[in-house]
Amino acid sequence: MSGNAKRSWEVEALKGLLLIYILLGLLIAGVNFGWAPKADEQTQAVILRVWQIYENEFKTLLILVCSLLTLRITGKKHFPRLRRYNLIGLLCAAIVVHIAAPLIAGNPDLYFVGMPLPWSTGGLRLAVESSAFYQAQSAHWGARSIEMTLVFFAAIHVIVFPGTFLLGRRWQCSTLCLFNGFASEVFEPAFPLFGTRKTAGRKFLRTFAVLRWFVLAVSILLTLVWIVILIFGIRPAAMPLLETFETYKYLALELLAAMFLWCTFAGRGYCYYCPLGTVLSWIGRLVDQKIITDKSSCIGCGKCDSVCPMSIPIREKALKGEEVVDSRCVGCGHCVDACPVHTLGYSTRFLARIGRV
């Protein structure tokens, strides 16, 4: 079998696994949110267990298998150093969040609080005993499990935000994120699932810039509302409506939108408007996150632009030896790995200080 044939088989295998992941996600989510609430307790328990296996064991195994396939594909022409670090980090994160921590906490639904504020208010809702989320979790796993889950939720913030002050947005968005970050890395050669790879045009970028600020505003507002509810111990009459709104927000703007973009555009589609990513990009500015372009001399091949999942124009800066600073940069390092003359490097103030760029 020729190298090209083998590459084609590996890419097709990735596309097949991505399709299976999407279809299973849509099917199980539909059953879990649509049929389960009306089913008897035994049926609900079976549906819940299937959902947990999909989110935990299946997802972890998928990250392992697809990471190996992606490394075989991308490693044929160059050594993908930063991408390798990404995949190792994501696999370790999956083992902790989806396997080890649920066993310790006694809560297979731990992933519901696996992202920091303002991405999800799950942890805040879990701390409010009158919320439907608390009631459901308490009924399934008990008070001790909820306490352990809240400790985990607090720990996520301690890990993500200080780490971002050292390593920039790369730390969460390309090494730890188990919502969209993992998919964008482990399935990268398979995107888009249908059609050919596209570069975001100005109209797309303008539209998603508006969507970015809208989603951030909604997420911050929800966070503040739940903080007020938690601090003052109030139970507003609209609380059930608020929780229903958050459920549909997750299904529409996060889950379904991300999967649609995987099918039609790119793996990082959701990252264009992720509210947590926006907040972390502000920290990235503070810590001088950037792509340096003067480690050698740019030859203008444009490979950096072609592999950037966030449509950042790197080549024009590299030709001048200027730094690339962009709030969309997730620090994935694909441009650094792809550069044939090794003129690019990912840097923050901390990385520059320790000589790792």
Image: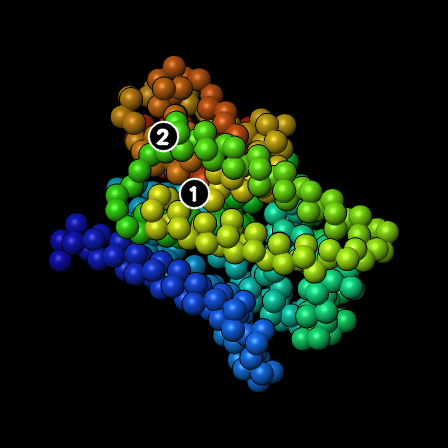
- Extreme residue toward the top, this view: 320
Q: Label 2: which residue? A: 201
Numbered label attached to residue 286? none
Task: Name the spot of residue 13 as percent of width and height, x first.
Answer: 28, 60
- Considering only order in the chain, which callout, 1 or 2, is on the residue closer to the N terminus? 2
Which is nearer the eye, 82 or 205? 205
Q: Is residue 153 left or right of residue 91?
A: right
- Extreme residue toward the front, this view: 237
Which is nearer the eye, 94 or 115? 115
Question: Considering the image in quadrants, where does the N terminus appear?
Answer: bottom left
Label 1 SS: loop
Which is nearer the eye, 32 or 352? 32
Q: Is residue 226 left or right of residue 277?
A: right
Give neighbour class at mark 1: few <14, some 14-19, many 20+ (Cα, 10 Å).
Answer: many
Specify the color scheme.
rainbow
Residue plotted at (52% across, 73% down): 35
Q: Amino acid at mark 1?
A: Gly
Q: How many circles with numbers are drawn on the protein?
A: 2
Q: Label 1: which residue? A: 269
Task: Name the spot of residue 349 as percent of width and height, x first.
Answer: 59, 28
Residue plotted at (40% across, 33% down): 204
Residue plotted at (49% across, 71% down): 31
Q: Is residue 150 visible?
A: no
Q: Amino acid at mark 2?
A: Gly
Residue plotted at (63% across, 51% down): 120
Q: Is residue 340 visible?
A: yes
Give neighbour class at mark 2: few <14, some 14-19, many 20+ (Cα, 10 Å).
Answer: few
Q: Is residue 116 left or right of residue 173?
A: right
